[in-house]
Amino acid sequence: MTVHPTFLNLIMVVKKMKMGFIFIIIMCLLTPVQRAQIPTVTISDLSFKNIDFAMNLYRQISSSHDKNIFFSPLSISASFGALLMASGGVTYDELLIGLNLEQLQRAEQPELIPKLFQLLHENITQNGSLKLDQGMALFVHRHFGVEKAFEGQIKKFFHANIETVDFSDTKRSIRSINDYIKNKTKNKVTDMISTLDAETQLMLISTIFFQGSWQMPFNPNFTHGASFYIDNYNVVQVPMMVKEDKFFTMEDYPLGARVLKLPYQQGVSMLILLPNKGMDYTVIDEDITAEKFITWLKRLQKMCCTRL
Ligand SMILES: *[C@@H]1O[C@H](CO)[C@@H](O)[C@H](O)[C@H]1NC(C)=O
Ligand SMILES: *[C@@H]1O[C@H](CO)[C@@H](O)[C@H](O)[C@H]1NC(C)=O
Ligand SMILES: *[C@@H]1O[C@H](CO)[C@@H](O)[C@H](O)[C@H]1NC(C)=O
Ligand SMILES: *[C@@H]1O[C@H](CO)[C@@H](O)[C@H](O)[C@H]1NC(C)=O
């Protein structure tokens, strides 16, 4: 049985200034990929396209500042994937290209891409052990008519609800939206929005909640202060978690970086990318593609006594 990634780039964390060298943390579920349900295009194709979308988006975000970055590419692509069903013409084409999904589109199967998102979501969450909750809701102004067909589709493919609000009552709308987000994130994200334009007609809210336990937990007693290298010139002292054990790792020599996999108990993993000494992480950023990513997953090997 070969291992295919069915789900990638749920969450990307890239730490720069505060925490030092680049870390790209990407969740991946290593299970065989479903081939039967849709003849020509599969959820692994969607995953593959989503990785490149994620990296392109990451490069865009990181080019404008030097702060730490934390985002969920899957939430972003699913949100715009949902909007595809409500768009046409040039808008539709632009969304598809922006999402890097134009190659998966089939003119005779207009519901194919939404269906792939649905199957991917089901494949990730069906096995109830994973504490992953993706939420989507469209808050629409009460004068705004939503076509029944769209309401049905967005519910079917994205489990999204349509909530009617009176945006001219900004205080109340803010409270409704914040309550929704707070509930969906198990009280972790509160007061997400503080202001709202009274002219707002529609807001798409997307949430994601993940909680996992390490297969090999760190002992907090071993945490101690250590140097963290942001780049060749900047070093900060941070509390460093420590663990000595066998881990899945691999060296990407052409890239000049090491990959480490930290598995959770629930069948997903965190991948950490650590540039070699002296490597400029911005050069590495440019080179990360879905193809490279899949190669890493295939070549990861359990190595003795990696010290974290
Ligand atoms: C995902 O798809 C694969 C391949 O069909 C299947 O073996 C696996 O059980 C699925 N996972 C879930 C959680 O449905
Ligand atoms: C979120 O709302 C649901 C349905 O109203 C409720 O059952 C659940 O307990 C709420 N969760 C939190 C964390 O408040
Ligand atoms: C950490 O140290 C305390 C005090 O020595 C000890 O009671 C505790 O069991 C240790 N924790 C672990 C996970 O080893
Ligand atoms: C879910 O998947 C994980 C990882 O593959 C596995 O350890 C666990 O037994 C599965 N749980 C169920 C209920 O199938």
Image: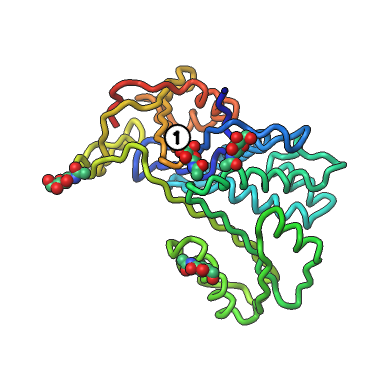
Q: Name the residue under label 1.
A: 271
| Residue at point 47%, 51% (across, down) | 131
Q: In this view, does 216 lie above or below 296?
A: below
| Residue at point 83%, 53% (across, down) | 88
Secondary structure category for the residue under label 1: strand
Amino acid at dot 1: Leu
Ligand 4 lies under 8 Å from the Cβ of mark 1: no
| Residue at point 36%, 41% (across, down) | 214
Question: x, y percentage for residue 18?
Answer: 34, 45
- The quadrant the C terminus occupies is top left
Ligand 3 position by quadrant:
top left
For disc 1, the neighbor class at 10 Å (few under 14, some 14 to 19, many from 20) is: many
| Residue at point 68%, 52% (across, down) | 80
Q: Is residue 268 visible?
A: no
Q: Nearer the viewer, residue 32 or 20?
A: 32
Question: x, y percentage for residue 182?
Answer: 48, 66
